[in-house]
Image (cartoon, coloured by chain):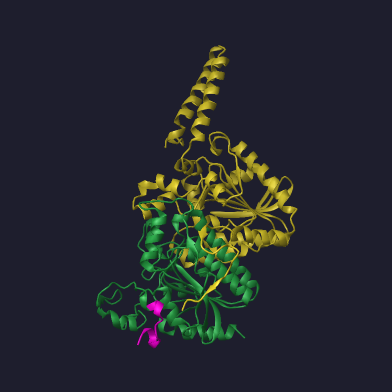
Amino acid sequence: MSLFGRKKSPAAQTKKSNIPDGLWIKCKGCNDTLYTKKLDENGKVCPKCGFHYPLRAFERIDITVDKGTFEEINAGLRSIDSLDFFDSKKYEHRIKQAEEKTKMKEAVITGTAQIEKIKIALGVMDFSFMGGSMGSVVGEKITRLIEFAADEDLPVVIFSTSGGARMQESTLSLMQMAKTSAALARLSEKGLFYISVLADPTTGGTTASFASLGDIIIAEPGALIGFAGPRVIKQTIQQELPSGFQRSEFLLEHGLIDIIVKREDLRKTIASILKFAVK
Amino acid sequence: MNGGGLDFEKPILELERKISDLRKFSAEEKIDVSEEIKSLQNKLKKIKDEVFCGLSASQRVQIARHPKRPYFMDYADRIFSFFLELHGDRRFSDDKALIGGLAEIDSVKIMAIGHQKGRDTKENLLRNFGCAHPEGYRKALRLMKIAEKMKIPVVSFIDTPGAYPGIGAEERGQAEAIAVNLREMSLVQVPIICVIIGEGGSGGALGIGIGDKILILQNAYYSVISPEGCAAILWKDRAKAKVAAEALRLTAGDLIKIGIVDEIVAEPSGGAHRDAGEAADNLKKALVKNLKELQKIPVSTLVRNRYNKFRKMGAYEGEENGSKNKKSKNQ
């Protein structure tokens, strides 16, 4: 049996997980030794302590939507290095590396799918592609998805996991925050519903745009969610940060998210919300 | 930095001191040195032009952060014939780093909002170095909604190193406050002009940066991250900030090429801090001209154009812009 007892798509089977190779790993949550196969079978959640490991986009789609209902849109969009950006490597080279590593063209996959037979517009980010950073393509795909949903009268569900705006595209990345947020304004004007699901980690420009604009915001347990990264905050204020700072539970306590849902319950919870939103 | 002067400004400052000494000498000794002064002034102009034409990106960042650079209220004093500051977000507090109020410019009534930095340590503590908290962004949006009711344009003055990264800011939803502004500003039913007058620091700048016209002062910058932050992450070395500043394409000249800003407002020779009056005059002219133009456009067109303006931003390949939402079976 695979993730939550649902059969894996061929795509998911070929994708490599973020969990180090090898049969056994030491759990980041409880330090216990974990059999990786057991972890995979449990949706990449530690069966002992419940630590949620990152999911690849296709794995996420697989455990979320009705089997075989996902149809990708705008799959062909690819980043270009329009600013001729290079640090230790050229941006173009980094894109190629990310493509090879992840077998994806960008840090988000978008399309349509059904969850318990309710049709949705779905976006799923993947942290393994350049830290899930938002450049022009991520912004464009998210915006097109929202516009598509507005045209087709569909609710939107977006799973975010991202380090923020992609530095290599500078202000072009920054403007994706404006673009995606403006598209959501139009979706709202049409009375359409948007569920934002936040996975570990979601920070920076992604949090400061579409990820924080869900009508309902769901987070996985223990996810780091914030505007600034903890390291930057610590450097700025020169103080130790309180324990649990910027984790899902902290955000819930401060009224910033609606609900924390364990991975195994996410599909069911999203479906139950959608049943209220879609008549 | 010495006495507020930047390294590359040294030859200019030296020459200026010489001229002033010569003037003093001439007045005291009653000797005519007008020829010498004239020649020195010509030389000064030449040096200024040389230095400021060839400025690197990181030098422009230095000018944008110059401790004597005019801030929002320095422009307000010179540009507005009326200003009434309005306070508070009605939820938590009044953010002194992001302020605003009713203003009049060339007899046009506007809502002015902007980041405000401090001139000295005491004032900087009050202004939090121009780094706003969520309540600043929420106040700004509240004021924009008032502008909508009054049917007066909004002008935002951007000058921040970034939105504040602190515990309280996170607790009160810094990300949400900025995100909501991005969404709501795209719908505001009055003209919006944004002008980057100094530092355009990432999301903190963009949080009041959605408008129909984006202006930038000649030596201001706008970037997704500070050059120092970028260097620390990508080069693992903050000292590489100079290289990062170039790579980020953050200068006014770069930004107009990329299509992020619409218009560059000229600064006096040597930078806005050399002559705040002239800088303010230039800014006022640009604002008045753009306000007049935008007020002619019907609101529905204005808001549609605003959407399309940001909608177009980005560079990618693959499917054509026109063939939107092409489906391809994936599973």
Residue B105 counted in the magenta span: no
Residue A10 counted in the magenta span: yes
Q: Up-down: is B26 above or below B206?
A: above
Residue B123 in the image, given as x and y percentages of width and height: 50, 48
Residue B59 seen by the camera = yes
Nearest the viewer among A189 and A128 is A128
Tally of marks: 0
Residue B195 in the image, given as x and y percentages of width and height: 60, 49
Residue B300 in the image, given as x and y percentages of width and height: 72, 62
Q: Up-down: is A188 above or below A170?
A: below
Residue B131 seen by the camera = no
Nearest the viewer among B143 and A266 is A266
Q: Up-down: is B216 above or below A102?
A: above
Q: Specify whether B153 is left or right of B9.
A: right
Q: Which residues are magenta?
A: A1-12
Q: Up-down: is B36 above or below B308?
A: above
Q: Please give the letter of the chain rendered in green.
A: A
Quarter occupied by residue B86: bottom right
| Quadrant location, the N terminus of chain B | top left
- What residue sits 51% from the left and 26% below the top? B16
Residue A99 in the image, given as x and y percentages of width and height: 40, 64
Q: Please give the letter of the chain rendered in yellow.
A: B
Q: Specify whether A150 is left or right of B249.
A: right
